[in-house]
Amino acid sequence: SGAAAAAGAGAASVGSVCGTNGTATSPKSQNNNVSRLAKSSTGEETETDREKYQDPRETNRALRVAAEEAFLAAALAAKADIAVVSHEFSTLARLNELASEKYEELGETVAGLGVFADSLRRKDENVSPLFDDLDAVELNLTVLEGTADTLEQEADRLELRAKEVRALIAAKKK
């Protein structure tokens, strides 16, 4: 109770202090509050009484500390969020670079294939008449193969007939 009275007296010497409802109180009414704090209904100081009549400078200091800690926590969270976004941007930038390099390689390959296709087209134009001649030769070859098959069948038939004739001649000679 002596510490509470000393705190009240120190606050009273500075000037007016906020009362319990937020209004300014005179040193005289503050002393009444301190004496009420020192003498509660049971004659002892209670925790509620201490909180109710706490020095406003202590309350303001505690609020400032809490506000600074909240601001620091928010700043650290914002810094962490910015670091994540920054990392995402750098990763995406690297992926973009790799994709650009790959597209450049593909562009060179496609250009090379275009040159190759053009070369084949020119060769095709030069060889195209030969393909027409080859088609004619192939058709003639197919006709020739058909004729050969027909001649072979006829030769087989003639051989069979010659065998039969020989068998008849041999039978007549006997």
Image (tube, grey):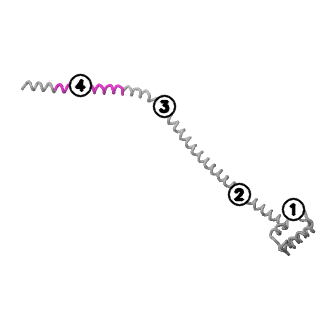
- The quadrant of the image that shows the C terminus is top left
Going from N to C along the chain, the mark reached first, 3 or 1, is 1
The range drawn in magenta is 137-162
Q: Position of residue 121 (x, y in %)?
A: 48, 32
Q: Nearer the viewer, mark 2 or mark 1?
A: 1
Q: Position of residue 45 (x, y in %)?
A: 83, 72
Going from N to C along the chain, the mark reached first, 2 or 4, is 2
In the picture of the structure, the residue carrying the numbered disc 3 is 122
Which secondary structure, mark 4?
Answer: helix
Q: Are marks 2 and 4 in contact (CB under 8 Å)?
A: no
Q: Label 4 vs label 3: CA separation?
A: 48 Å
Left or right relative to 90: residue 120: left
Q: Amino acid at mark 3?
A: Arg
Q: Label 3 vs label 1: CA separation?
A: 100 Å
Q: Residue at x 75, y 62 (%)?
A: 69
In the picture of the structure, the residue carrying the numbered disc 4 is 154
Q: Are marks 2 and 1 in contact (CB under 8 Å)?
A: no
Which secondary structure, mark 2?
Answer: helix
Going from N to C along the chain, the mark reached first, 4 or 1, is 1
Q: Amino acid at mark 2?
A: Ala
Q: Are marks 3 and 1 in contact (CB under 8 Å)?
A: no
Check residue 77 in the rendering and tell me which mark sits there, or answer none. Answer: 2
In the picture of the structure, the residue carrying the numbered disc 1 is 21
Nearer the observer, 129 or 85? 85
Task: Based on the picture, tell me whether residue 139 belongs to the magenta stretch.
Answer: yes
Going from N to C along the chain, the mark reached first, 3 or 2, is 2
Going from N to C along the chain, the mark reached first, 2 or 1, is 1
Q: Nearer the viewer, mark 4 or mark 3?
A: 4
Q: Amino acid at mark 1?
A: Asn
Q: Position of residue 152 (x, y in %)?
A: 25, 27
